[in-house]
Amino acid sequence: MKPLKILIATPEAIPFAKTGGLADVTGALPKVLNRLGCEVRIIMPLYRHVQEGNFNLKDTGIKVSLQIGFREVSASVFEGEANGITAYFLKRDEYYDRKYLYTMPEGDYFDNAERFIVFSRAVIEAIKKLNFKPDIIHCHDWQTGLISTFLKTIYKNDPFFADTKTLFTIHNIAYQGQFPKSHFQLTGLPPDIFTPDGVEFWGNMNLLKAGIVFSDIVTTVSEKYSKEIQTPEFGYGLEGVLQAKKENLFGVLNGVDYDDWSPEKDKFIIAKYDYKDLNGKAKCRQDLLKEYNLNLPDDAPVIGIISRLADQKGFDILSQAMEELMGMNLGMVVLGTGERKYHELFEGLAKKYPKKFGVKITFDNKIAHKIEAGSDMFLMPSKYEPCGLNQIYSLKYGTIPIVRATGGLDDTIQDYDAKTGAGNGFKFKEYSAQILLAKVKEAIKVFSNKREWKRLVQNAMQQDFSWERSAKRYVELYERLCR
Ligand code: ADP
């Protein structure tokens, strides 16, 4: 059989550019698909960050030219490589040569609609010129939502795409790429798709909705979340559209790239370790406390947090719980960027409790690794969580997750049962500060029993969430589309 040809179209991917879990997925998945026999390439915008990185990119000499509203816009195609995977980059400095990917501290870039309309259209034109004819274009999030829309309309009779199908993955339904109707004319799409059955959403253009409606298959990043988003509580207004798509909507849990995220191989941590020998973990804890300038007794657990500082991640209930938490025998380290109110909250706490609370308001991969290895527990009290990666990374590092039962957190963490020893973390249901506090207390109690805690840690570390299983599921879905 001929290998499946897959094009991953994404607004971000490691090692090139990352704002969140999406980049981890689009960086790791292609490697595994490749091992499973697919021919995979990725395509993304050429951001400033990528131009300034040492990625040894080459100009392919290919240029695409697009009609965007009344303007002719061109973009050049660059080529690079990471982990044996060819990556294409669309270069148009007017749009992508900027400090941030989508959002500045003051808010979103005003022309995000245009930036990603151009990207989506340019992807299609670029692969034609590159003569890479994919069986599947696997699109990710609203920034790529129009790719399937273009294919099903403007390119409907284009023989080049006669056998190309689309799969669209939603990483977080709260981010929809909604823009005023006036932007629709930039797309060049037929006006008859600006309807509630098409790309229209309460009078606006909605790019995530476009991706859902026009793609052949839609997936999201955990089984639980695929069900949740079909309800008003989690669907952010798109629950009806998703219910209508339900026959072609699937949950595929994200995997972990253990080359990057395991204490046996981690190049950022001071001492490596595995489940048989945890001595290195104690050294990593010391190193983390030093990094954050904390002074904690050995019997106090360190709780780590690495997160976008947004309401989604549960920081409203956590802020209500903080004073009481600081009264307990524990320490806390936070790494994150996001909403100003949380910057202020955490900086205030660090001043008030300098020995036991530390915060770094920055995006720093190395420190993220140090927190995974050096913490005893990892806290994710999310209001909703499509998949969540850090709780899965934490398991591998023997850093026991304390999570709220939602989305991928619910699918990956089983609440610890002291009687049977079953479970890999601590999980609570009700979204409230009181219940969160009760769960943390329960975790601290288990922590105080060294033997019991060690057994829990060793169990967690032996769990396997590698990409193979999830990538095979994607291949099944790709094959189903090609049949
Ligand atoms: P989301 O994509 O919703 O932000 P995920 O848990 O799916 O959440 O993925 C977050 C990813 O981003 C993880 O790899 C995490 O380690 C990383 N991350 C988040 N904030 C930071 C930060 N401030 N510094 C370094 N890495 C971060």
Image (spheres, rainbow, N blue to C red):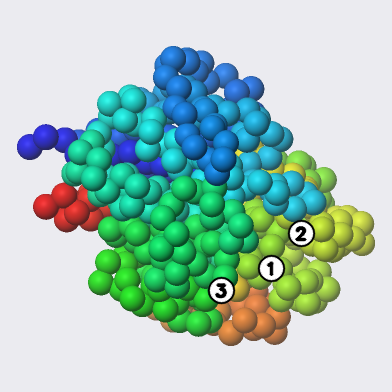
Compute the Cα span from label 3 to label 2: 27 Å
Q: Kindly give the residue lying farthest to the front in the view shown.
A: 70
Type of amino acid at the residue the image marks with label 1? Asp
- Determine which of the numbered discs, if any, sits on residue 311 in the image: 1
- State the residue position of label 3: 202
Secondary structure at badge 3 equals loop
Secondary structure at badge 2 equals loop
Residue in view at x 52 percent, y 20 percent: 55
Mark 3 or mark 2, whichever is nearer to me? 3
Type of amino acid at the residue the image marks with label 2? Glu
**Could you say where residue 259 lies in the image, as x and y percent from the top left?**
42, 37
Compute the Cα span from label 2 to label 1: 8 Å
The image quadrant of residue 29 is: top left
Q: Nearer the viewer, residue 8 or 157?
A: 157
Q: Name the image quarter holding the N terminus.
A: top left
Q: Kindly give the residue lying farthest to the left in the view shown.
A: 1
Q: Nearer the viewer, residue 154 or 255?
A: 154
Mark positioned earlier in the residue sequence (3 or 2): 3
**Could you say where residue 6 lies in the image, as x and y percent from the top left?**
28, 39
The image quadrant of residue 320 is: bottom right
Instruction: Find out whether the residues at labels 2 and 1 contact each other: C-beta distance under 8 Å.
Output: yes
- State the residue position of label 2: 339
Mark 3 or mark 1, whichever is nearer to me? 3
Is 195 placed above or below 420 here? above
**Could you say where residue 117 lies in the image, as x and y percent from the top left?**
51, 45
The image quadrant of residue 27 is: top left
Mark positioned earlier in the residue sequence (2 or 1): 1
